[in-house]
Structures are given as C-alpha cells and as structure tokens.
Image: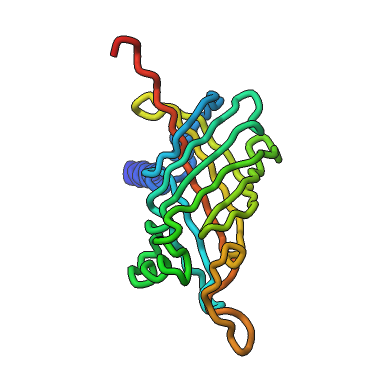
Amino acid sequence: MKTLRNAIAAAALAVVSAVTLFGGPAAAVAGAQAYAPIPAGDYKIDPAHSYIGFAVRHLEINWVEGRFKDFEGTIHYDEKDVTKSSVEFTAKVASVDTEVEARDKHLRTADFFDAEKFPTMTFKSLNVERKGPNDYFMHGELTMKGVTKHVQFPFHIAGAVKDPWGNTRFGVEAQTKINRRDFGINYGNAFAGGGLDVGNEVNITLRLEALKPEPKPAGR
C-alpha cells in the first residue's frame, strides 16, 4: 500500500510539473493579464519590441518574408473616442532585411525600392472606424517609392499595462495587403504557363508596442 501511495504521489507531482512547464491550465492562470484602460495621449512606437514585416509569393510555390528594422512612429490615442486617434510612422528602406544579404542588396536597387532615391516610406492615418470592442479599421496614406496610395489596416488593440519601469504600454496588431505594382515596383517575369516569379500581392504585418513614458516627479 505504501508503494502504491508513493507511486500516486510521484505521478501527481509529474503532472503538476508538466502543466507548469508546458503551458497547461496552471501556467495559463499564472500568465493571465488584466488590461487597464489606455490613457489618452501621445505614444512612441518602441522599435525594440515592434515588427514591420511583409511576405511575397516566390515562384508561385512559397512565401519569402522580410521586415524593415529601422523605423519610428507615434500614436495619438484618444481615450474618449478611439476613432479620433491617429498614427504616423517612417521606415528607412535601406533597413530591409530578408536574412539573405544578396537579396537585400537587390531590394535596395531601382528594381525594387530604390533606396538611394527614395530613402524612406511613410504612413499617415486619415481616419479610424470601429468594428468591435477592440477591433478597428484604420484608413491612411502609404507613400513608397514616391507614390502615395490609400490603404486600410484592420487592427486589434491590446493593453494597457505598466512596464517594470512604470511606463504605460499597449499593443497593436494589424494586417493588410497591397499590390506592389501600384507603387511602381514592377520587377519580375511571367511564366509561359501563367503565374509570376515574384508575386504582385504583398502581405503586410504590423505588431507594434506603443510606449508612453511615466512623467518624472517635479524637481528631478
């Protein structure tokens, strides 16, 4: 009987350890986050914890992904009416990174982004539509390679939280699609049987962390 009790205890301990290590109910409860209302004001996009990425179809069989590593932006958040909020960001085209240096060099040429002539791409919001409690559509103007086009981003807001240094942060996730040829990026060839070696449709993914520094006490 003692051996049986010891075996049961050991099994129970193993189950608890597995739940904790591999994200079962106990871990989920421990990691639950109760978000606070997002305070109004101006926030900076934190590039160290944000991502501006894209994906393009290659040879009609796979997706090649990349991102821009050097960017900055601001979010003006209206606590009383989120639809009155606004966003602006600028990315340096030369910071494009697909993890293949030869391809990145080609992307910086006039075949694609022409980084020397058009060093930045920008986005400036025009208006926001509410689609749900935390879901919205942002309409704005994207400028790339000297061409400005209207685009819309469905986006979701998560937050707010206080970071370990007392600053307020919230998150934004957004996805959209654009046609690269609308912006004068025309490099590529059609296959005789149909399709393209470089796809026209570009999937854009934004994962942004907005930061509002905690005001310093007077006298410091």
Spot occupied by residue 139 in the image (x, y as percentages of width and height): 65, 45
Q: Is residue 27 above or below residue 142?
A: above
Q: Hey, which residue is sitting farthest front in the picture? A: 117
Residue located at (28% from left, 14% from top): 220
Please name whichever residue, 134 or 179, is drawn nearer the observer in this view of the structure. 179
In this picture, residue 194 sits left or right of residue 108? right
The quadrant of the rendering that contains the N terminus is top left
Name the foreground residue: 119 vs 19.
119
| Along the line of sight, the residue nearer the viewer: 78 or 123 | 123
> Residue 61 location in percent, x, y?
54, 77
As drawn, 157 above or below 203: above
In x, y percent, where is residue 143? 55, 53
Q: Is residue 127 left or right of residue 14?
A: right
Vertically, is 27 above or below 182? above
Residue occupying the point 54% across, 27% down: 38
Compare residues 144 and 20 and report the one nearer the observer. 144
